[in-house]
Image (cartoon, grey):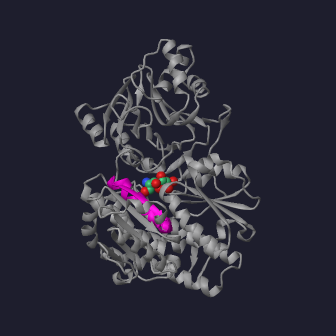
C-alpha cells in the first residue's frame, strides 16, 4: 500500500512529482523520495516521515531533470528509515515499487554472490540489481526489465528509469494497480487516477501481468507472455481539484459531516423516488435466479457486509455466507451454481478482497462489487458494479464510505427481496421512505456533536473499552471498536451482547467503559438485561439509543440520544455516534487522526 508516480516531462519534474505524491499520501506515509535523470545521471532525494520532510529536503537541495519517479511508503520490508525509502537505485537504474516481492531473499543472495552490494533491507532494491545484472549481460533496458520481471514472484507495481535515458520510463504491474497518464508531450505513471488528476484525465490502466515501455511519443504495452497488446484509454473521474479539509480540522471530521449529502447521492442512484422502489437496470443480473449470496471484504467494509447479512436473510430470505477476505481467499469454500458474490471495498484495490473475488469468479459466481472508485481493479473485474457515491475518502479511518456502503447494500437487499417476492409493496415503500429520511436524521445528530467532547474525555482515560450490540447492532459494535482503536490507539473490542456472560464479563469493573449500541428494537429488552449485568459489576456504560436514559433501568455514565426511525435503517444512524466517539477521543489523545500510525488507506498487499 505505497504510492508510486512517474513523469516524462517537458519541464523540470521535481515539484510535480511531489504534488502527485501529496495526493497519494493516503496510501502510506512512513517515508518518501524522488529520483530524476539529471544531465544523463540518476539523482535522488529521500526523507523519513511525512511528505513535508521530502519537500523541505528538496527546497534545501533542489533536483533538476525532465524525467523522474517518486514514492510514498508504507513499510513492508525494512524499517521506515531514509535508507529504506524509495526510490532505490544504483548508478544505472532507479526503481519505485508498491507491493511485495516474495522471492526477494533468494534473488538477493544470488545477486550478492554475483558481486552486487545492497544498501537497504528492502525487497525493492533487489529489482535494481536484477535489472542491472541483465543490462551487464548486454541487454538494453527494456529487455533487461523483461528478463528481470520473469524472475519476480509476488505483487508489484513498478516505475523504473535509467541513466542516460531521459526519454524512457518502464512500468510493470502484477497485483498492484498502475495507470499510465497521457499528456500533451508529457507522459505520466501513477498508482491511481487521483495522483494524476492535476496533469491529465486520459488514462490507460495496465492489465494484470502487463509491463510498458513509455516514451514521450509512444507507449508500448506487453502482456505477461511478452506479446504487444493494446489497452483502452479511459477518462478518469478523479477530481483535479486539490482535495482539502475546508474549515474542518481533519479530513475524517469533514467526511463524517459529508454523510448526509453523500448518503443522499448514493440512495438516489438506486431508488426510483417517483415509484418508491429500488431499480438496478444496469446491474444486468437476474436477481430472482440467485439462491445464495456470498459477501467478503476487509475491516470496516466487512462490518458493512455483516449488517447486510442480517438485512438479506431477514428481508430477501436468502442464505448469506460472509467472511473476511483474508480468510475466505484460502478456505476453498464450496460455492453453489447460482451464487452471487458481493465484494465491498472503498478503494477497490484491497489485495485480500481482490484475491477472494478471483476465487469466487473461478468458482462460477456472479460477481458484484460495491466500490467507491469505479475505475478500481475490483470494479474492473466485476460483472456488476454498485458504486458508492461518497467522493474521495482521504481519512484513513473509513466513515462516509461505510455508511454509503450500507446505503447501497440496503438497496441491494430491497432489490433482491422484490425480485423474490419476499417483501410487500407497502413494506418496500415504508423502508424506502425511512431510508430517504436517514440524511436528515444524521444531520440532526451532527448538531449535538459538542456533547461528544465530554464523553471523549471519559473514554480517553481508559486503557480498554468494550462495545456491545445484539443482532444487527453487533456489527456496529465491532465497527465502533475498530474506529476507536485505529485512531486513538486505545484497545477496544466489539462483542455480541449475548456473549458477555460466556467470558468477557470477567473484564468488567469500574475502569472498563462499555459502549452499548442498542436502538429500541425487538432485542432491546434483552440488551437491557446485559446492561444490568454490567452495572451490577460496576461497569461504566455509554448507551447509544433512541430509547430515553431512564428506559435503560440502570445507571449510565453517558447517554447518546439517536433519532427514532424504522429498525431497518438504524445501522446507518447508529454508525455516526460510534464515528464521533472515536474521532473526539482521538482528538483528546492528540493522535494523528487522518494518518494514524502503522496504517494506510488502501491495503494493496497481503
Ligand atoms: C477502516 O476504518 C479501515 N481503515 C480499514 O479497515 C478498511 O476498511 C479496510 O482496509 C478495507 O479497505 P477497502 O474498503 O478500501 O477495501
Task: Give the residue at the far right of this rendering.
Answer: 337
Q: Considering only vertical position in the picture, is 374 above or below 603?
A: below
User: What segment carries the magenta color?
Assistant: 474-499
Residue 50, percent across and down? 31, 42
Task: Give the residue at the far bottom of this rendering.
Answer: 426
Q: Pick whichever, 401 or 132, lies toward us.
A: 401
Q: Pick whichever, 466 or 561, lies toward us.
A: 466
Q: Is residue 381 magenta?
A: no
Question: Residue at coordinates 43% horizontally, 38% vertically from top-left?
Answer: 7
Question: Residue at coordinates 26% horizontally, 72% vertically from top-left?
Answer: 450
Residue 181 in view here: yes
Residue 153, percent across and down? 59, 31
Residue 242 in view here: no
Q: Is residue 485 magenta?
A: yes
Task: Give the residue at the far left of this rendering.
Answer: 60
Residue 585, percent across and down? 29, 61
Q: Considering only vertical position in the picture, is 164 above or below 49?
A: above
Question: Residue at coordinates 25% horizontally, 54% vertically from top-left?
Answer: 590
Q: Considering only vertical position in the picture, is 215 above or below 108?
A: below
Q: Considering only vertical position in the picture, is 16 above or below 575?
A: above
Q: How many marks?
A: 0
Label the magenta part by its dominant secondary structure.
helix
Q: Pick whichever, 221 or 601, lies toward us.
A: 601
Residue 97, percent across and down? 47, 35
Amino acid at each position: 500500500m505505497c504510492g508510486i508516480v512517474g513523469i516524462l516531462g517537458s519541464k523540470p519534474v521535481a515539484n510535480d512529482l511531489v504534488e502527485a505524491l501529496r495526493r497519494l499520501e493516503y496510501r502510506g506515509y512512513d517515508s518518501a523520495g524522488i529520483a530524476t535523470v539529471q544531465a544523463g545521471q540518476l539523482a535522488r532525494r529521500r526523507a523519513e516521515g511525512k511528505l513535508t520532510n521530502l519537500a523541505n529536503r528538496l527546497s534545501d537541495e533542489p533536483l533538476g531533470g525532465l524525467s523522474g519517479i517518486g514514492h510514498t511508503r508504507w513499510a513492508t520490508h525494512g524499517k521506515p528509515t531514509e535508507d529504506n525509502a524509495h526510490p532505490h537505485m544504483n548508478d544505472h537504474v532507479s526503481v519505485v515499487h508498491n507491493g511485495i516481492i516474495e522471492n526477494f531473499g533468494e534473488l538477493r543472495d544470488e545477486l550478492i554472490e554475483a558481486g552486487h552490494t545492497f544498501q537497504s533491507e528492502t525487497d525493492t532494491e533487489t529489482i535494481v540489481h536484477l535489472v542491472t545484472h541483465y543490462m551487464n549481460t548486454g541487454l538494453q533496458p527494456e529487455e533487461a526489465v523483461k528478463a528481470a520481471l520473469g524472475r519476480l514472484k509476488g505483487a508489484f507495481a513498478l516505475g523504473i528509469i535509467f541513466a542516460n535515458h531521459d526519454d524512457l520510463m518502464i512500468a510493470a504491474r502484477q497485483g498492484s494497480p498502475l495507470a499510465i497518464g497521457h499528456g500533451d508531450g508529457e507522459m505520466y505513471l501513477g498508482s491511481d487516477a487521483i495522483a494524476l488528476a492535476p496533469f491529465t484525465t486520459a488514462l490507460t490502466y495496465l492489465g494484470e501481468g502487463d509491463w510498458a515501455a513509455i516514451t514521450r511519443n509512444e507507449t508500448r504495452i506487453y502482456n505477461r507472455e511478452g506479446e504487444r497488446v493494446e489497452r483502452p484509454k479511459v477518462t478518469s473521474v478523479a477530481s483535479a481539484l486539490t482535495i482539502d479539509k475546508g474549515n474542518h480540522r481533519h479530513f475524517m471530521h469533514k467526511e463524517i459531516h459529508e454523510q448526509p449529502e453523500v448518503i443522499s447521492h448514493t440512495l438516489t442512484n438506486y431508488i426510483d423516488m417517483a415509484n418508491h422502489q429500488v431499480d438496478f437496470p444496469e446491474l444486468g443480473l437476474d436477481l430472482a435466479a440467485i439462491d445464495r449470496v456470498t459477501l467478503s471484504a476487509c475491516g470496516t467494509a466487512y462490518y458493512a457486509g455483516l449488517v447486510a447479512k442480517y438485512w438479506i436473510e431477514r428481508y430477501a430470505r436468502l442464505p448469506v455466507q460472509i467472511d473476511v477476505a483474508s480468510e475466505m481467499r484460502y478456505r476453498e469454500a464450496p460455492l453453489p451454481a447460482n451464487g452471487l458474490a458481493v465484494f465491498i471495498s472503498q478503494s477497490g484495490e484491497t489485495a485480500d478482497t481482490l484475491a477472494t473475488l478471483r476465487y469466487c469468479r473461478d468458482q462460477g459466481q456472479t460477481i458484484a462489487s460495491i466500490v467507491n472508485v469505479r475505475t478500481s481493479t475490483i470494479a474492473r473485474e466485476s460483472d456488476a458494479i454498485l458504486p458508492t457515491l461518497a467522493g474521495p475518502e482521504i481519512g484513513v479511518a473509513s466513515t462516509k464510505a461505510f455508511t454509503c456502503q450500507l446505503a447501497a447494500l440496503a438497496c441491494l437487499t430491497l432489490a433482491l427481496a422484490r425480485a423474490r417476492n419476499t417483501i410487500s409493496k407497502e413494506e418496500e415503500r415504508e423502508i424506502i421512505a425511512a431510508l430517504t429520511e436517514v440524511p436528515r436524521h444524521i444531520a440532526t445528530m451532527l448538531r449535538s456533536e459538542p456533547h461528544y467532547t465530554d464523553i471523549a474525555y471519559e473514554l480517553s482515560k481508559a486503557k480498554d473499552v468494550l462495545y456491545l450490540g445484539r443482532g444487527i447492532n453487533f456489527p456496529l459494535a465491532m465497527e465502533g471498536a475498530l474506529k476507536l482503536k485505529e485512531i486513538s490507539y486505545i484497545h477496544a473490542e466489539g462483542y455480541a451482547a449475548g456473549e458477555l456472560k460466556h467470558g468477557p464479563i470477567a473484564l468488567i469493573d469500574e475502569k472498563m467503559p462499555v459502549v452499548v449500541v442498542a436502538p429500541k428494537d425487538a432485542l432491546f429488552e434483552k440488551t437491557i438485561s446485559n446492561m444490568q449485568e454490567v452495572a451490577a459489576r460496576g461497569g461504566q456504560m455509554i448507551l447509544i439509543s433512541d430509547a430515553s436514559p431512564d428506559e435503560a433501568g440502570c445507571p449510565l455514565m453517558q447517554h447518546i440520544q439517536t433519532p427514532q426511525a424504522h429498525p431497518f435503517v438504524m445501522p446507518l444512524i447508529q454508525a455516526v455516534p460510534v464515528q464521533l466517539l472515536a474521532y473526539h477521543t482521538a482528538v483528546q489523545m492528540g493522535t494523528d487522526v487522518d494518518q494514524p500510525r502503522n496504517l494506510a488507506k488502501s491495503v494493496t498487499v497481503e
